[in-house]
Every structure is written in structure tokens, then in C-alpha cells.
Image: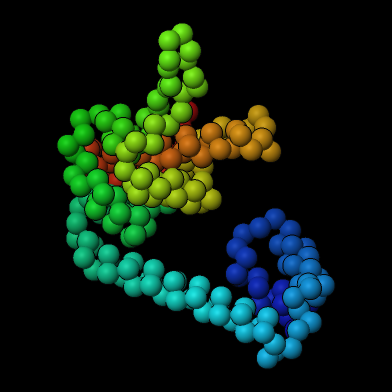
Amino acid sequence: MDQDTFIADAWEVVGRKVSKERLLADIYHTAKASVGLPIARDSDAALMFRMVLAEGRSLIAQRNAIEDRAVDLLKNHRDYQLLTSIPGIGPINALTILAEAGDLRRFGHHRQFLKFCGMDLATIQSGTFRGQSKLSKYGNVRLRRTLWMAGQVAILQKTNSFRDKFERYIARDRHNLHLRRKAYTAIAAKMARTVHGIIKRGEPYRPFFEG
């Protein structure tokens, strides 16, 4: 495949990017120089690579089957409809939240839900020593992971309050890894508050920018 053909075929796959043609050309030239390219089709390396790809495709098929089943079971469930209106929450994340948290209305305040998820702050103290405040992580690990993953997806999407908060959080130093980790944690906590809020109010998510 020549470069022009590759760029034409990959154009829609890459999505919206600045200087997309230059990016695809760079990918093409990098692939041509790849150490993994000049191998025989029936080599052991190619065989193992196909096995890894097959495993990945199998996992994707299982995920799709779970998504389809979740939609069939919950498409008329009001809380499911509310959850899937939030950026980053699809059928599997919504199913996990409902399965792990149950009826979120039983939490009178979002801080109670944060504590249930293990996303409340805890400080180690001993005598006069006071350590740094960190997430307690005493709550439901599967729920906490789901909210974290939903936040990661949300900040990659277009206009929404999660992405806006993340961009503002890292604005002073975008390449500071510690700052980015704190921003990811803040987004996960915001996701938990949003999940609790929309279920409590019974209103779908509104994609507005925060002040």
C-alpha cells in the first residue's frame, strides 16, 4: 500500500486531528521502518502476533455481547437511562454502577456515596504527626474503578463539564504528571457526584461548562 492509499483508507479511522495528513504520513513512514515489518508471513513472530490479535478480538466480542445484553435488560430502566446520559458512561459502566451501588437515592448526600466508593479523603495521624490526606480506598473497588474509567472517557469527548474541569486543572502545567494524576482523581470524584446528583434529581445530564 502506498502512502496516498494508506492516508485515504485511514482518514476516517483517526478522527478529528490537527494536521491529520501529516500525522498519517508520519505513521506510514514509521511503519515502513518498523523492526516488526520484514518477517515472513508464516514465521513464529507472525503466528504469535495473530494469536494476540485473536485474543483481543475475542475480548471485544465478549464486551459487545455484554453491552447488548445490558441494553436489552435495562433499556426501560429509568436510572439506566439517566446514567447513560452522562459522558463516559455506556451500557457496561451503567450496569456496573447499578449492580454495585443499588439505589443511589438511599445516600442522602453525595459525600456518603463518595465514602461508599472509597473516594473520600483520609489522613494518617499518630500523636503530633499528621500525614498527607489521600483517598481512603476503603469502599467498593469495582465501583471506584468504573467511575475512574468513565472519567477517562469523558475528558476525551467534546464539550462537557468533565473535560472543562480537567483542562482547567492542568492548565498551569500540562506536562506535570503528578498534577495530571490529581486531575484524574478530581474527575473521578466529580463523576461520582454527578452520578449521585442525576439519580437523586431524576434529571438527565446537561452538557454545560462550569463557571
- Left or right, 31 with respect to 57, comes to right
The reply, left or right, for residue 175 in relation to residue 135 is: right
Residue 16, position as x, y percentages in the image: 62, 59
Tell me the residue at 44%/71% (across/down).
59
Nearer to the camera, 74 or 85: 74
Is the residue 93 above or below the residue 163 in the image?
A: below
Q: Is residue 72 above or below residue 117?
A: below
The residue lying at 56 percent from left, 77 percent from top is: 53
Q: Nearer the viewer, residue 45 or 15?
A: 45
Q: Quadrant of the N terminus?
A: bottom right
Figure coloring: rainbow
**Where's residue 201, x and y in %?**
23, 38
Quarter assignment of residue 29:
bottom right
**Residue lying farthest top?**
128
Give the left or right position of residue 61, taking residue 38 as reference: left
* Residue 62 image offset from top left, x and y in percent: 38, 72
Which residue does the image show at 39% across and 36% down from the upper left?
137
How many numbered circles are shown?
0
Q: Is residue 155 above or below residue 132?
A: below
In this view, 173 is above or below 60: above
- Residue 57 is situated, as x and y percent measured from the top left of the image, at 49, 76
Who is closer to the viewer here, 103 or 18? 103
Give the residue at the far front of this rendering: 127
Q: Residue furthest bottom?
A: 42
Residue at 74% in and 88% down: 40
Visible in this render: residue 154? Answer: no
Can residue 177 be seen here? The reply is yes
